Amino acid sequence: MASPKRWRPATLLLLVAAICYSILLFFIASWLPLLTKKAAAALTWAVYSQIVKGLVTFLAVVFAYIAFIKWPSLKNRWLFLLNLALFSAATWHFISRLGDSVNEYIHYPQYGTLVILWYVFLKKTINDGVKIPLRLPGRFSGPGVPAVVVAGLLGICEEASQFLIPLRVFDLQDILLNFMGIWFGVLIIRLFERNSLFGEAPRFVPRADVDKGLSGR
């Protein structure tokens, strides 16, 4: 039986969510400086900076706790640990450079969420049997590669749009921080995904065949 060529309703909702969030990132780039200035003016910058750093520390602790819980069931756990160590070293490097420029920390949750949304949508698309662009053949046919490519291109475009926004400037470091956020999202996916992110995608089985197999038991 031929594979369906249309997305299922749940997959379409994921696509809408991914697109809407991607568009929202461009608005955040415009409004974030104004909002943070108002917050800093109300609290003083020192207090505002400590609040942001506290939230980042809380996020790191939650991530470490989930990693600890998931550790026994992780596949290639030592490869994950190496990846996490490299990520932590790169993050420490940026934190030492940023100092009190705490607004830059938002790149991590922003682009971590972005790559997760696109990954979930692309995984569902593959499961629906719909062909997707940017998908590599063979060993790297999973949804991880196109999800990272889409998130990376959006990160570059979002930063390039700073040329068009008053009082904003293009900064290569922001692009690197966008990719750090994507890396963070990939690590989160890795904790919850049993299959390989970038490896071979599971073979699509039409829903009718699944139902037929269940009814034959």
Image (tube, helix red, strand yellow):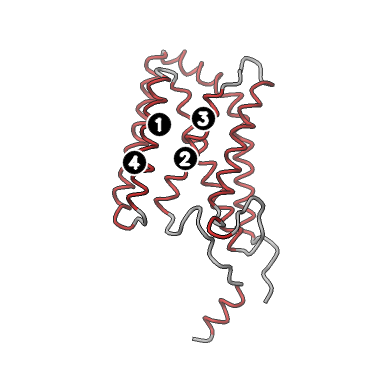
Q: Residues within 10 Å of mark 3 (few under 14, many from 20)?
A: some
> Which of marks 1 and 3 precedes in the sequence?
1
Q: Which residue is mark 3?
A: 176
Image quarter (top left, top right, bottom left or bottom right) of the N terminus: bottom right
Amino acid type, label 2: Trp
| Image mark for residue 146 | none
CB under 8 Å between callouts 2 and 1? yes
Q: CA distance from mark 3 to mark 1?
A: 10 Å
Residue situated furthest front in the rendering? 138
> Where 42 falls versus 1 (above or below)?
above
Mark 1: few/some/many CA within 10 Å (<14, 14-19, 20+) = few
Whole-angstrom CA distance, mark 3 to mark 2, is: 10 Å
- Residue 20 vertical position relative to residue 29 in the rendered view, above or below: below
Q: Earlier in the sequence, mark 2 or mark 1?
A: 1
Residue 131 x/y as whole percent: 67, 59
Residue 34 versus residue 132: which sits nearer the camera?
132
Judge from the rendering whether residue 196 lies leftward or rightward of residue 54; answer left or right: right
**What's the distance in space between the residues labelled 2 and 1, CA to CA?**
11 Å
- Horizontal side, residue 93 vs residue 23: left or right: left
Extreme residue toward the bottom, this view: 216
* Numbered disc total: 4
The residue nearer to you, when weighing 198 against 206, is 198
Residue, disc 4: 62
Check residue 90 in the rendering and tell me which mark sits there, or answer none: 1
